[in-house]
Image (tube, helix red, strand yellow):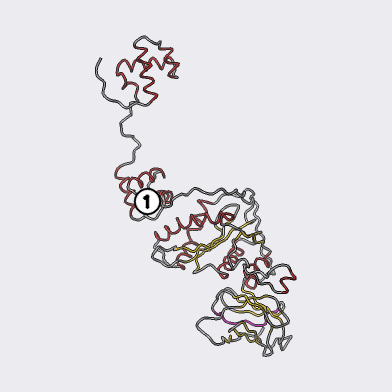
């Protein structure tokens, strides 16, 4: 018997070798061996013939040790590694695979990309930690039934750039981004602006799931007499806007409770950062244009799910609703004897009206719109308006003079001017 070369065999192939050798030594019939090998008698005869001719090598698949005809071309593999090292260095495996297909016209699987990247020592972009156990909340069945919104401070334009905040709202039923934009920081103006974009673009949602950020939820223990009698604190500026639109605010106690918007931000901090870097975008204005014109639609096309019920739950905006007035900073003030309204260093003169020459001692509603301009309302009548002033976060204080002793909000004065900011009147209303 000729000496056989060393051959790597699987456990199944070694078993077949042992059984067929027993058949050749007439210690076992071929029919008995076929049953033990789990093959038909006819196939066992073919295996016996190959075994008689090539011994153990006849039991090994003929393609073993040969290069696969479907193997990746070495030049193409080199090109993918080079793109991974240079242009798409900040992309994760899946995102990089998509760009290869859509931009570079290279059709490879994600597993191929992963294997090539690991072979060149490129580790995964993010480490996966074992997740804590949280009970999954089923999605809402209709689009517009619930939104989740939040702000995500991050170095969106690269590690060497100043951080800013991405404001985003997603629909709970579909997971799609309803609206998103960049601002310098997460605050009252950002949420009111986000709410206005949502209402103007889609309609009024039934509810909004949110965290207990200071501009969304009152986290202080200060109660006025009126608040104690009413059994609730006066809401924040955003809370008053939600209440005026009939939107139910739902407050999350943990980040995991609003996990869908948190997961979206994790994905955006991965994909959007890489896309902005690829497009050489480093300013908020450029980034907002990129979101509107390209990214949001492309992102929703990839990740949004169809709702369980096709009929949406968005409510139309009432025709008699003044959206500019509703989505604005709100303050209640008593007009002074000089027919002027004061909000710290801001002074607004009120001219005589057609029906009432003096508004002294009248309780009025002062609104600062999202463009910074001011309006003063007496009941439903607009009685004064001014030019824009800097929009800063509101400061909450108590009204100390009658007739209103309720808790109110006071506007911050511009930091560049320590004196009074006397706002000129633009017209008589």
Left-right relation of 222 to 85: right
Q: Which residue is mark 1?
A: 104
* Image position of 339 with respect to 304: above or below: below
**Which residues are drawn in magenta?**
381-389
Residue reaching furthest top? 26
Q: Position of residue 372 (x, y in %)?
A: 56, 77
The image quarter in which residue 202 lies: bottom right
Residue at position x 36%, y 54% in the image: 89
**Category of crowding for the residue at label 1, using alpha-carbon neighbours closer than 10 angstroms: few (below 14), some (14–19), many (at least 20):** few
- Which quarter of the rendered picture does the N terminus lie within? top left
Q: Position of residue 341 (x, y in %)?
A: 65, 84
Residue at position x 48%, y 54% in the image: 267
Residue at position x 68%, y 69% in the image: 233
Residue reaching furthest front? 221
- Which quarter of the rendered picture does the C terminus lie within? bottom right
Quick one: 24 or 64, which is closer to the camera?
24
Left-right relation of 15 to 323: left
Residue at position x 68%, y 72% in the image: 223
> How many numbered marks appear?
1
Q: Position of residue 221 (x, y in %)?
A: 65, 69
The image quarter in which residue 276 lies: bottom left
Does the magenta-highlighted stretch encompass residue 180? Answer: no
Q: Position of residue 403 (x, y in %)?
A: 73, 81
Residue reaching furthest left? 2
The image quarter in which residue 222 lies: bottom right
Left-right relation of 46 to 382: left
Does the magenta-highlighted stretch encompass residue 388? Answer: yes
Mark 1, secondary structure of its residue: loop
* Image position of 289 with respect to 1: above or below: below
């Amino acid at each position: 018997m000729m000496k056989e070369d060393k051959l790597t065999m699987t456990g199944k192939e070694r078993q077949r070798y042992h059984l067929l050798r027993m058949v050749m030594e007439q210690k076992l019939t071929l029919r008995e061996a076929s049953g033990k090998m789990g093959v038909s008698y006819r196939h066992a005869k073919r295996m016996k013939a190959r075994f008689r001719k090539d011994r153990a090598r006849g039991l090994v698949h003929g393609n073993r040790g040969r290069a696969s005809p479907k193997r990746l071309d070495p030049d193409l593999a080199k090109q993918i590694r080079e793109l991974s090292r240079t242009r798409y260095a900040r992309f994760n495996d899946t995102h990089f695979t998509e760009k290869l297909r859509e931009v570079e016209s290279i059709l490879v699987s994600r597993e191929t990309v992963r294997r090539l990247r690991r072979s060149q020592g490129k580790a995964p972009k993010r480490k996966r930690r074992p997740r804590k156990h949280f009970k999954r909340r089923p999605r809402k069945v209709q689009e517009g039934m619930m939104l989740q919104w939040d702000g995500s401070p991050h170095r969106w334009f690269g590690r060497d750039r100043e951080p800013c905040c991405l404001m985003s709202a997603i629909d709970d039923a579909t997971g799609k981004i309803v609206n998103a934009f960049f601002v310098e920081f997460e605050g009252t103006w950002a949420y009111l602006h986000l709410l206005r974009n949502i209402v103007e673009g889609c309609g009024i949602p039934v509810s909004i799931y949110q965290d207990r950020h200071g501009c969304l939820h009152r986290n202080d223990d200060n109660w006025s007499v009126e608040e104690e009698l009413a059994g609730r604190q006066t809401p924040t500026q955003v809370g008053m806007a939600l209440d005026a639109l009939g939107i139910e605010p739902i407050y999350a106690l943990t980040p995991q409770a609003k996990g869908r918007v948190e997961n979206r931000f994790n994905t955006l901090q991965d994909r959007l950062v890489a896309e902005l870097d690829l497009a050489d975008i480093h300013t908020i204005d450029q980034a907002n244009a990129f979101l509107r014109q390209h990214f949001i639609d492309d992102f929703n096309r990839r990740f949004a799910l169809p709702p369980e019920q096709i009929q949406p739950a968005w409510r139309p905006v009432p025709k008699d609703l003044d959206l500019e007035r509703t989505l604005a900073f709100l303050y209640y003030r008593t007009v002074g004897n000089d027919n002027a309204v004061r909000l710290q260093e801001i002074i607004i003169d009120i001219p005589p009206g057609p029906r009432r020459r003096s508004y002294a001692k009248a309780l009025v509603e002062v609104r600062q719109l999202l463009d910074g301009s001011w309006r003063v309302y007496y009941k439903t009548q607009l009685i004064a308006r001014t030019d824009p002033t800097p929009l800063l976060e509101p400061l909450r204080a108590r009204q100390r003079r009658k007739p209103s002793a309720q808790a109110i909000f006071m506007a911050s004065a511009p930091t560049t001017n320590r004196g009074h900011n006397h706002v000129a009147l633009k017209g008589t209303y």
